[in-house]
Amino acid sequence: MNRNKKRGAHLDRRTIILIAVGAALAIIIIVAAILLMTRSGGGGKYEEHYSAAMEYYISGDFDSAVEEAQKAYDADATEDAAVLLARCYDQRGDSTSAIYVLETWLGKNSGSQAEALLASLKGEAEEEETMTIGGKEVTEDTETLVLTGVDLSAEELDTLSKLTNLTALSLNDCGLTDASAVSGLTKLRSLSLSDNEIKDISALRGLSELRTLYLSGNPIEDLTPLYSLTGLTTLDIRDREITDTELAELEKKLPNCTVFSDEATVEVKDLSLGGVDFKSDVTELDLSGRGITDISVLADCTALVSLNLSGNEVSDISALVNMPELTRLDLSSTKVSSLSPIMTLTKLQYLNLSKSAVTNLAALSGLTELTELRLDGCAVQSISVLSGLTKLTTLSLRDMAIKDADLASLAGLTSLKTLDLTGCLSLTGAGVDALKEKLPNCTVTASEEIYGIKLGDGEYQAADTFVDASGKNVTSLENVSRFTALQTLLLNSNPGLNLSGLGTQTSLTALELSDCGLTSIGELRTLTALKTLSLMRNDLRDVSALGGMTELRELHLSYNAKLTDISALSGCTSLEYLSLNNTGVTELSALKDLKNLQTLDLENCPLIDTSALYGMTSLRTLYLSGCGISRTEIGYLSSALPNCTIYA
């Protein structure tokens, strides 16, 4: 096959497609503009995010376009939003997510535009040039390839030699007689050629990026080509006779490398690690929480079937390469970041990596016997490798930063019985529900926070920082504790509102509760981070709950006719603005020490004692009309407060 010709044709078609898409976008932008003008007068979250996504798309910033398009889709899952989100993913080079978005939307809706784009994307995916090696499809961008027990033809080995982006390669028991096919794969960091018939390894001489190399079970004649691989940290040459001289020279040339080789005799040894004594032929070992940092002593434990290293400071697990019988492995809460040493442990059925330092899961691609995998709290870059672990029945991804698009990698895991997504707060309820439909036999657990929070007639997201539920017939705040980052909450004009539960939102900095018929505000006592508070037009008598709000800058208590006692306000030492107009306040001594107060509104208050005002020299604006104060006294006040404008 002439791949060059085919690639040229493919590029021409994509060029034509891009030109066509560009023309279509011009039309889409005009239509979108019309739609935006007709939706709620151009306002609302949907329009804001949709418009922003279009602008980013046109400018070529597809990462930002995806983010804004996702927000628009979450606000209103229209066909336009689904199509735009899919186009953004496709332009970012992620056609898999683009197809997933469209298939999910079309699973519940119908639309000719979405159907046409889905057909086009699937057609492009089929046309993209792929190659097959040992029954697996690969492209020139493939970075990880694991084949076991597959006899490779000369043509397949030629194809393999062109995969120059490979960083991890395993070709165990593939009938290889030489290593020439990998000689040009200079990006390789992990290579396993175990159980082949390779005698000459000179082709490996130039693979300077190699860190782990597995050559066990090969009749290698000369080890000297390995001397140049000074970056090696793990080398396995077991099942080959080696002399003491050869081994000593190899260890000298590779001083930073752990070498696994056969010894003349094998004896059962007495070992100790983390205060636990055991024999080298042990099959089960629990070393959890033992303060262990180095597990090199375990290299002799080749019969281990179950190993628990949870809760230790371990980072180097190269000793595990010597444990081909392992079926259970717990590395949770360790410092392990590289999984290369376990990529050949193909008997593993249980693996726990929760709260480890792992960020790349590529080494798991060959562990196809896994039935249970735990990755809780791992900061992994991608979970796409999980799509190949089709025997998984239990998968835990708690507290991971995965997004809806990542769920496409899980949709084909039809053997799953339990999937835990608790704490994955970057997901949306819609995305999780779509996955549940694809996995009908699986119990999927997710956090309530990813679903909408109901307040009266309004619905909001757990991550919202600003919520306006004014006039939404809110009577209960039992769900308010589900907000995770709320800073501003507007609840005006909700008569009959019960404040129970509001005290949990201690991060609030702005709160409005005007015209709610409130008679008590004791629930607010814990909201000491408030900077702005409005309690106008209620039926308050007691404001003692405000006494500890030392951060409060602006306070509105107007039109609480029964309010006479404001002594608690003496503790609001940061107050800059205070409105008490149309209350029953008669004396102001509680305010005399508020050194930051600049604006005070006392209109229509039945003031009897105004003496406290004379010492409030920080005032810049004072409202006193309707208070029954004589012009003579106003004059005295003006003299006492020369920097203050008095409205009487």
Image (cartoon, rainbow, N blue to C red):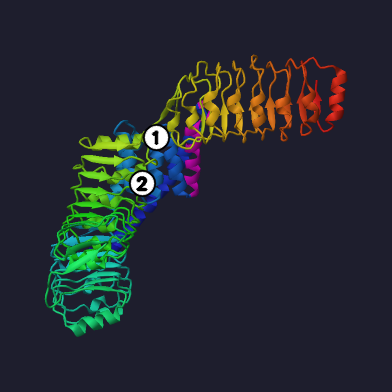
641 over 558 or under it: above or below = below
252 over 89 or under it: above or below = below
Quarter where residue 634 is shown: top right
Bounds of the magenta segment: 40-59
Q: Is residue 372 magenta?
A: no
Q: Which residue is mark 1?
A: 449
Crowd tier of the residue under label 1, counting other residues whose Cα lies within 10 Å: few below 14, some 14–19, many 20 or above: many
Quarter where residue 424 is shown: top left
Pinpoint residue 570: horizontal percent, then vertical percent. 67, 29
152 over 88 or under it: above or below = below
Identify the residue at image location x=82%, y=33%.
Answer: 643
Residue 635 horizontal side relative to residue 44, left or right: right
Q: Residue furthest bottom?
A: 245
Residue type pointed to by label 2? Met
516 over 529 or under it: above or below = above
Q: Nearer the viewer, residue 428 or 151?
A: 428
Residue type pointed to by label 1? Glu
**Residue 115 appearing in the image:** no
**Residue 344 appearing in the image:** yes
Q: Nearer the viewer, residue 235 or 172?
A: 235
Q: CA distance from mark 2 to mark 1?
A: 14 Å
Q: Which residue is mark 2?
A: 400
